[in-house]
Image (cartoon, grey):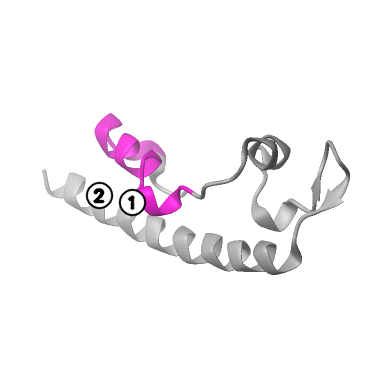
């Protein structure tokens, strides 16, 4: 995300551990999804089963909301860092 690389290590860690950004998935689902966004994750690889479209759409919206929220936090950290 824009500006993340200019944050301090502790600020980057805080962003990486942002609780609202953690979505509990089963081990199989997590393995199948990997680093893909929910928008790019259509199918459970191992069983060739489509991801539930209602769940997927809900998660796509959540990702978009979180992206905005996390970017605001990053921007605020960078604003604070410039003052110091």
Residue lying at the far top of the rendered structure: 9
Q: Is residue 9 above or below residue 83?
A: above
> Which residue is nearer to you in this view: 81 or 33?
33
The range drawn in magenta is 5-22
In the picture of the structure, the residue carrying the numbered disc 2 is 77
Q: Is residue 7 above or below residue 65?
A: above
Q: Is residue 13 above or below residue 2?
A: above
Q: Is residue 17 above or below residue 42?
A: above
> Which residue is nearer to you in this view: 24 or 5?
24
Q: Which residue is painted at 53% across and 64% down in the image?
A: 62
- Find residue 4 and report its image quarter: top left
In the picture of the structure, the residue carrying the numbered disc 1 is 74
| Helix, strand or loop status at disc 2 | helix
Residue 15: x %, y % from top left: 35, 44
Tell me if 36 is positioned left or right of 72 in this view. right
Quick check: is 8 in the magenta stretch?
Answer: yes
Q: Which residue is painted at 33% across and 51% down in the image?
A: 74
Quadrant of the snapshot with the C terminus: top left
């Amino acid at each position: 995300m824009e500006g993340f690389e200019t944050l301090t290590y502790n600020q980057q860690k805080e962003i990486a551990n942002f609780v609202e950004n953690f979505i509990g998935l089963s081990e199989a689902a997590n393995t199948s999804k990997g680093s893909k966004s929910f928008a790019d994750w259509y199918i459970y690889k191992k069983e060739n089963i489509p991801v539930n479209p209602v769940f997927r759409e809900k998660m796509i919206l959540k990702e978009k909301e979180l992206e905005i929220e996390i970017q605001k936090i990053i921007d605020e950290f960078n604003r604070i860092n410039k003052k110091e």
